[in-house]
Amino acid sequence: MAKARNAVGNILVLAGVGMVLFALLWWGVAVRRIAVFPSGFDLETPSEGTVTRLAAKHGMLMLSPGQKEEFGLGRSLSSMDGDYRSDIAVVQETIKAEGPAPFGLDLSQQNVYVMNRRSCENVESSMSTTAGEVVDRSGSWSINFPFGAKKESRNIFDNCVGSSFSVHYVRPSSADGVATYLFRGSHGFRPLLGYVAESMGLPPQTTYGELKAELLAMGLPVDELVRNASPGLTAEERAAFEQFPDSRTVSLNYSAKTEWEAEVEPVTGTIVNLRNSVTHIYVNTDVQTFLPLFEILANRSEDPAVLQYLSQVDQQKLTEPKELYRVEYRWTTRAVRNATDYAGPRVAPMRFVTSYLMTMMLLLGAAFFVGGFVVRRKEHRSAVETVIFDDGAEAGEEEGP
């Protein structure tokens, strides 16, 4: 009986040690292989929204009120399984406008994301592209937050400006019955990438004649200013004016500001609802081109008409960016349902794989380990008591008559 109890104690201790080792190996090896961004990934998340046109082409003639058009976007995410590696996932994003482009603004996109399969963090790769151009998204997230997303800030990549911005946890929420975390963030003026502006259909340049026409519409008749100043112009100043025919090209530079708000299912890290995305597109005419003209006109500021118009030019703050478009969109109800149908069923298995199984094995291992020692201790105490009892009995026999 004593040997059997001692054997049971040893078995319990060994079983406990085995379970603890299994839990550690599960976390260090199995979880790293099982809890990864999947291959065969395919998700449709269409959007709907509006584009508001706030100014004419050069941003100087403001439209009041702004003109508004609705639009729809089809969006699909599909894994490029042939380019997967053990630790790398490659996903293609295709965004297509549904119907005519609002105000000619093409919002279609083609992006390829390369990310770490375990953390879902973008990594540097020549396959990582926007509109066919290689872009470095490393250190940010795009189509998925990390598994077990926490209530902490993350860097989200903005393909339009080629850089990331921080989004922060706001509060718990829910989307279509799935528990979520709400994240929100924004960034200020950043230059719009040239190839992105081109893909949108934004013109890279204009002409002096087109610019004069817009200035005239806003009450600044450049030709009249020149005529008023002409009588007193020197030969050099006349030559300077002749350098500005109506056909002369003038660069247009674009920048953007972005606001972003989305819900994330934290266990799988899936973005399940893009509640709002607002992109403000600004234009800035290269007014440095016209500095020679403004200097000549400033020298004729004793002319009341010239002074009046120069004052208007100054009030318009021509060197500051002017908002051209405001693009606002959000996921449709169908998009949210598609995303939650994908993420929802994966929550319980993901928790079991990444947390529950390991915790259960650690607790059972600890219980078996302690139980084994308790059994062994009882056996040890029993053996000691038996020895003491036997020694006492022998002593009593020796002292007897």
Image (cartoon, grey):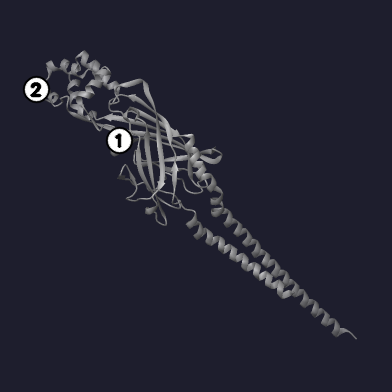
Q: Which mark is residue 197?
A: 1
Residue depicted at 70% across the width and 66% down the height: 374
Residue 297: image quadrant is top left
**Are there few (<14), some (14-19), or many (20+) residues within 10 Å of tag 1?**
many
Residue depicted at 70% across the width and 68% down the height: 375
What x and y, as percent, mark residue 340?
A: 51, 41
| Image quarter hosting the C terminus | bottom right
* Above or below 369: residue 153: above
Residue 219: image quadrant is top left
Nearer-N-terminus badge (2/1):
1
Marks 2 and 1: which is nearer the front?
1
| SS at badge 1 | helix
Q: Are marks 2 and 1 in contact (CB under 8 Å)?
A: no
For the residue pair 317 and 363, the one nearer the viewer reads as: 363
How many numbered marks does the figure carry? 2
What x and y, as percent, mark residue 277?
A: 42, 34
Q: Amino acid at mark 1?
A: Ala
Pick out the residue farthest to the right.
Answer: 401
Pick out the residue farthest to the front.
Answer: 99
What x and y, as percent, mark residue 107?
A: 35, 34
Q: Amino acid at mark 2?
A: Ala
Residue depicted at 49% across the width and 56% down the height: 34
Residue 43 in view here: yes
Q: Is residue 274 left or right of residue 251?
A: right
Residue depicted at 30% across the width and 28% down the height: 320
Residue 393: image quadrant is bottom right
| SS at badge 2 | helix
* Above or below 78: residue 23: below
Q: Is residue 73 left or right of residue 131?
A: right
Which residue is labeled 2 in the image? 235
